[in-house]
Image (tube, helix red, strand yellow):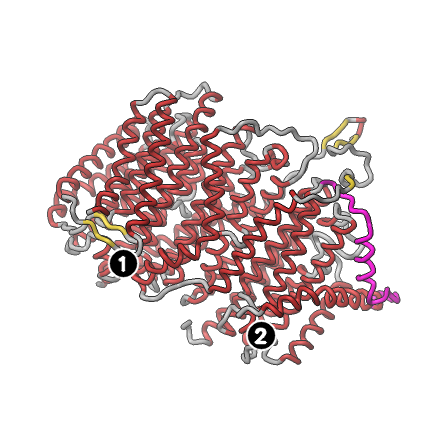
Amino acid sequence: MINILWAVVFVLVAPLIGGLVAGIDRKITAHMQGRVGPSILQPFWDVGKLFEKENAVVNETQVFYAICYVIFMAFTGALFFAGANLLLVIFSLTLAGIFLVLGAYAANSPYSYVGAERELLQIMAYEPMVILAAVGLYVATGSFAVSDMAATTVPVIILIPGLFLGFLYVLTIKLRKSPFDISTSHHAHQEIVKGVTTEFSGPSLAWIEISHWYETVFLLGFVYLFFAFNPLLGIIAVIVVYLLEILVDNTNARVKWQLALKSSWLVAAVVSVVNLAALYLLSGGVS
Amino acid sequence: MQIAQLLLFLILFPLIAAFFLLIAKKDMDRDWIVKISAVAIGAVSIFLLISTYDKGTMLVSAIPADQVGLGMFIIEMLVALFILCLGIRHKKWLVVALILIQSAMMLYFELVYAHGVHVASNLFIDEFSTIMALIIGIIGSLICVYSLGYMKFFHEHHKEMPDRRPWFFAILFLFISAMFGLVFSNNLLWVYFFWEITTLCSFLLIGYTRTEEATNNAFTALWMNLLGGIAFTGALIWLAMAGGDTMGLSDLLANGKAIALVPAALIGFAGLTKAAQMPFSSWLVGAMVAPTPVSALLHSSTMVKAGVYIIVRFAPVYQSSIVGYLLAFVGIFTFLIASGIAISQSNAKRVLAYSTIANLGLVVACAGIGTYEAIWAAILLIVFHAISKSLLFLATGTVEHRIRSREIDDMNGLIVRMPKIAAMMVIGIAGMFLAPFGMLISKWAAIQAFIDAPFGFLFVIILAFGSAITVFFWAKWMGKILTVTTDSQRIEGEVDKSEWAAILSLAGLSLITTLVFPLVSIKLLEPFIFQNYGVVASITQDNIIIMILMMFMIVLLPLSILLPHRKHRHLAPYMGGRTTTQDLRFSGSLGVQKKTVLSNYYLQPYFSEAKLKPAGIWLCSALIVVMLLAAALKGVIL
């Protein structure tokens, strides 16, 4: 059943949580690199400043795509937290991602163009695993509705550990962390300038940053679903997973897209075949 | 009786139109005949929907079978003779051999078994046939209307080609007539007759331009489909040997798997050839040489849809049988491999062709699984694919005439150069892969159907990969179109009215069907599935509301551009600090002015046709051989 209240809460609160997570991320990253780092509220100041800047564009349509991106990303997360069908949530996520890609294409700029192609490669790399993770959750809990998955008493993680690991692998892509920050990165070591966001500036860039906050909260919610039978464990798992992502981000060099695509597909294929086959046999071969 | 008249009208009326088109030599006359016939066929298809509404399956037994059957046999033999002569003239010995084998089998059938075959009702109509009739009647007619403008332009710019438009339009309508016949026939002998007519029509249309390439590709299409025809004949003979009282589709399906499995495997094989599944995919790709409306017709409302139609018809027989699983594997691997090849294609029509092959693969996979959920997904796929694909072909055809290229990279900035057509194309592409449009709903249904079926997880895994690939090649095309270039001229000009009418109607249809599909599902699909399986697949109300919400967002958001807003400051794109002009020209070495050219990723080392196609052909051929062996084994044991 759809719970509108949760959707509204997500739309209002998620940017705050997402921004805070980004701030903590930067602080921890800085400590890992032997720096003091900015205040954990820095992401909010950054975005605030972006909103005050002039919106310089290559053409008007970019603004439209940036706003569609944030609207559909918020919509994706809202659907998720409202307890809608998980597959539908994933399709909505793809739709949001496509708007960002179109925005990058629309600028007709070489750097953002390469960024757009790479962003599509990333979508192609992570999407099978995300769908298969959803399918795994369905097999384990018997429902595609996020509300049912969240309320389950089945220890999902014990049934689909392989799919969880696979999901963690592609989560790095989705969170735009090294070694898979191929289309754009928060770090300065990106050789295609800022990739998919090269031609966005001012308020448009701010919207994209806010979309990223929405997305982060949604993805952490997805991680929670694997542990939903025990809420405390779930929250601990979410924190551990994010810390792990920060560690991976800071200890890995960025790889080429070929490796990112091949390895994500290989991981997705292996874990899903093994895990789903095992589940199928365990359940007696009948659905 | 009224239903019988409607069905006969839909089968015979296009024939009359075809006759008049053959003798009408003036453009003006042809325009009127095509437009009036299209309106009539479309209107009667809709009237058919209204008059069969809520009535379930209806058998029509008023037609004298013996005389018609004899007539069909004579026509079949004449067609065979015609193909034989053409084959000998062009030295296509494979075609000659196949048509001789097929005719011999048919002759044997006619002499030995035909008198023992009795089918009470030769025609029938149920919800599935009604849906197919709507696709053929509405989309098929729209494509015919579009052809008026396209073919006129085509011959004005290709003076070297003989103008054989009367012939062309006559075949188009003959094709539509045969398709109606195919979906309304209960008697398998009749299905076979119309089946062969569609093979003939596609052969003639592909070879229309009479260039060497067109002729060769037409013969490729012919031999592959003749192979399917032979399998179909084999199924007929098998059924006749088994007694001859199960020659009607409704009787055969009601009698269960005992008799039906072997013919279902053979007819499934015939379906695979017609639906251009691997290893038979090359005929549909080769068919690209024909004028674009032909491609649109072959890909959306006729030909390949005949292949999947018959496979979906037999789905209850395939359900949880080894034959069904092997068939489903052929489909799902075709989906994966053809989607992959589509990434590496730079030619728009080839991308469309491979995407068609892929989507039909998904339909075949659903039908092979054969559960009630899978059939629900399969029929949705057929409907939505027909609409979006025809729209894309027609839009591509119009663009091709303006920019003189079928290359996707040449469509850069189409939204600036031809905004109206580009918008239609974007709707078509969105319809193929984005939520909440039809194809995505269907894929969603397919995931659900697969995972609930035994061993379905294997299919889900392959589908997940194929679906991600689909996103890649559609999105990069969409991005190309929506790139805003500043140096381009508007070249849209006056698009021919008939072309524009067809494109606009199809774009409208793709939006409307997405909105009203719950209704289609409740009123047409669910009764059909309930009748065959006793259970119903459907989509919950919550999800419908969410999708309608998304639909409104997608439709309304672009309108926000019309709202008054602040003008932003415009800057040139970042070019690494080089001095560039607004249209991305920069000084290269030796002071040469260079223009930046942006091209898509085609990932040739991974997804090239040369690499993937042989793999697909071997894999799917092996699966098909095992499928036929398994069916034969079962048949012998029984």
Q: Do labels 2 and 1 share a chain?
A: no
Q: Which residue appears farthest toward the front when viewing the image? A: B564
Q: Mark 1 lies on which chain?
A: B
Q: Residue at x 64, y 62 (%)?
A: A170
The three-letter amino acid code for the residue at tag 2 is Ala
Q: In which quarter of the image is the C terminus of chain A?
A: bottom left
Separation of marks 2 and 1 at Cα, in angstroms: 44 Å
Which segment did they paint magenta? A32-59
Q: Is residue A86 left or right of residue B626?
A: right
* Residue position for label 1: B261
* Image coords of residue A244 (percent x, y): 72, 70
Query: Is residue A160 among what the camera can see?
Result: yes
Query: Is residue A275 among what the camera can see?
Result: no
* Residue position for label 2: A150
Q: Mark 2 lies on which chain?
A: A
Q: Which residue is drawn at 27% across and 58% down?
A: B261
Instruction: Give whichever of A79, B160 is nearer the camera.
Output: A79
The three-letter amino acid code for the residue at tag 1 is Leu
